[in-house]
Every structure is written in structure tokens, then in C-alpha cells.
Amino acid sequence: MALTAATAAMAEDYTDMVVVGKGETKIALDDFNAIRFAGGQMVVVNEEETMATFDLSDLSRLYFLPEGATPVELTTTTAGTASAEFFNLQGVRMGRFSSLPAGIYLMKNGSSVSKILKR
């Protein structure tokens, strides 16, 4: 399943780059000025030094976050969903987890709210 979205945005609307490979690395866009690809690696540099190096064979995703955004955390469990409430992204309360179609939802469990993806 692929999730894509089209938005009109300018580069200055984004504050962070997230690199996902062996772990997840978040780098502030203001901290570097170039990304170079050489020798099977992606190298993030600023004017004075190499900030981070990633093997291209390990990379699974690279994406940019707008100011104030947080990545969606994914889980592969349904534990604790029996007493949870589910809402779509417009804030409309949905039914039980098992009856929801595939999509992104907000899960409220007590005072905790999480973004979830149901496949």
C-alpha cells in the first residue's frame, strides 16, 4: 500500500529532514547546506564538516516535515484498542477498530491520543 498526498508548499515551509534506514535521523534544514551522493552513500554536509553519512543500501525513506509537524508512529498491534475511541482526520468519531476501513485515524485511549494507520 502506498500513501501519497499532493500539496502546494514552498521549501521555506519545511524545517526538518527525516532519514529512515537503520533507525530514524531527524536533521534541521537550517543545520546543513548540501546533500551529496557518492560511493553508494548519501552525505549531509554544512560549510565546515560532514554532519551525517548514510549507506544508500540501508535507506528506506527520506522525507521533509513542515514546521510543528510530527511523524506518524506506526504499530503492528491492536492491543488496547477495545476501550479506545477512533476519529478520522476531520474529527468525526468512527466505529470499532475492526470495522474501520484502511486509512489514517486518531486513537484516543484515556487521556492519550495517537495517530494510527490501519492497513
Image (spheres, rainbow, N blue to C red):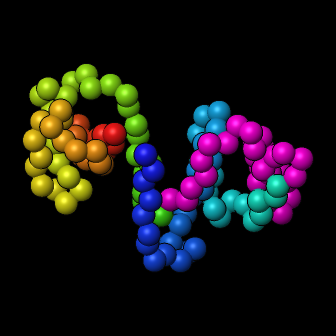
> Measured along the vertical axis of the image, is residue 40 above or below residue 83?
below
| Residue ranking furthest to the right | 39
Magenta stretch: includes residue 32: no
Q: Is residue 31 left or right of residue 16?
A: right
From the top left corner, tell me how far across and down residue 73 is, in percent: 41, 40
Residue under the point 12% across and 46% down: 94
Residue under the point 75% across and 65% down: 33
Residue 24 shows in this picture: yes
Q: Quadrant of the C terminus?
A: top left
Please state the extent of the stretch shown in magenta in the rendering: 38-65
> Measured along the vertical axis of the image, is residue 109 above or below residue 38?
above
Residue 45 shows in this picture: no
| Residue ranking furthest to the front | 1
Q: Is residue 2 left or right of residue 107?
A: right
From the top left corner, tell me how far across and down residue 44 is, in percent: 76, 54
From the top left corner, tell me how far across and down residue 9 is, in percent: 48, 75
- Please identify the dominant SS of the magenta region: strand
| Residue ranking furthest to the top | 79
Task: Work out whether residue 10 or residue 2 is closer to the camera in this orientation and state it.
Answer: 2
Magenta stretch: includes residue 45: yes
Q: How many marks?
A: 0
- Can you tell which quarter of the image residue 114 is in? top left
Residue under the point 77% across and 59% down: 35
> Measured along the vertical axis of the image, is residue 46 above or below residue 94?
below
From the top left corner, tell me how far across and down residue 18 is, in percent: 58, 50
Task: Work out whether residue 101 or residue 74 is closer to the camera in this orientation and state it.
Answer: 101
